[in-house]
């Protein structure tokens, strides 16, 4: 699907998934085709969300959705319904914004502004992700007709990797020591000699042989 890509990232024992989106716009000349593609892409996102839940890893869903939850156009309603069904929260809505839109275009004499680019996160208090800030950037150096979004987050888990074991290591025999190696060789040879000189080796089965 050319409207979706995803990647799983694992670093220092912390794993999460990112889904990148570029959704089709509601094309008035191809209404059925654009609707079918939009809904099919949302179904693929649902599948990846299920995968992330099975793996028990957080998931970011971000990109150009070509839909604004604050409007009531056809795709806007579909996206709002999808957000509700998947319990998704727009991260930009969690913080005050100096810029309220991510897309601006001039149509004839009118300037249209909308919030169609999003970063979504599953709204779950047990989520291991803690969002520190998320800003819509109105940067004059940005040559795109879309504003970028910056997001800062951290992992809330105390241990990224399993905590170190508190068990004390077993004492290891140093066979590099010539005296130690000689002692064990002699002990093993003496055991073999007992069995090789005994015509009935089973007599030794009840003996308790120990090495000091």
Image: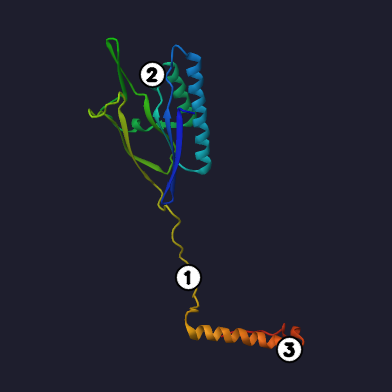
Mark linked to residue 198: 3
Secondary structure at badge 3 equals: loop
Label 1 and label 3: CA atoms lie apart by: 40 Å
Quarter of the image with the C terminus in it: bottom right
**Which x, y percent locates residue 204?**
72, 85
Q: Earlier in the sequence, mark 3 or mark 2?
A: 2
Identity of the residue furthest to the left in this view: 140
Which residue is the site of mark 2? 71
Dot 3, crowdedness within 10 Å: few (<14), some or many (≥20)?
few
Q: In terms of secondary structure, where does tag 1 sit?
A: loop
Does 43 appear above or below 204? above
Label 1 close to label 3 by CB (< 8 Å): no
The image quadrant of residue 69 is: top left
Check contact, mark 3 vs mark 2: CB within 8 A.
Answer: no
Mark 1 residue crowding within 10 angstroms, few (<14) / some (14–19) / many (20+): few
Residue 189 lies left or right of residue 81; in this view the side is: right
Of circles 1 and 3, the one toward us is 3
Marks 3 and 2: which is nearer the front? 3
**Rendered image quadrant of residue 209:** bottom right
Mark 1 / mark 3, whichever is N-terminal? 1
Observer able to see residue 126: no
- Which class describes the residues within 10 Å of circle 2: few (<14), some (14-19), or many (20+)? few
């Amino acid at each position: 699907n050319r409207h979706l890509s995803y990647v799983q990232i694992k670093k220092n024992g912390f794993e999460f998934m990112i889904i990148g989106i570029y959704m089709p716009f509601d094309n008035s000349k191809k209404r059925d085709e654009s609707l079918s593609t939009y809904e099919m892409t949302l179904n693929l996102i649902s599948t990846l969300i299920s995968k992330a839940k099975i793996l028990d890893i957080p998931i970011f869903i971000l990109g150009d959705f070509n839909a604004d939850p604050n409007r009531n156009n056809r795709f806007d309603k579909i996206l709002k319904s999808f957000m509700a069904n998947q319990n998704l929260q727009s991260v930009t809505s969690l913080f005050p914004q100096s810029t309220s839109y991510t897309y601006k275009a001039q149509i004839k004499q009118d300037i249209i502004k909308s919030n169609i680019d999003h970063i979504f996160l599953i709204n779950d208090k047990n989520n291991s992700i803690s969002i520190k800030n998320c800003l819509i950037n109105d940067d004059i150096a940005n040559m795109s007709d879309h504003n970028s979004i910056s997001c800062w987050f951290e992992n809330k888990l105390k241990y990224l990797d399993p905590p170190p074991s508190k068990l004390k290591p077993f004492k290891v025999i140093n066979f590099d020591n010539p005296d130690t190696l000689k002692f064990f060789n002699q002990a093993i040879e003496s055991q073999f000699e007992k069995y090789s000189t005994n015509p009935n080796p089973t007599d030794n089965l009840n003996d308790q042989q120990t090495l000091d």
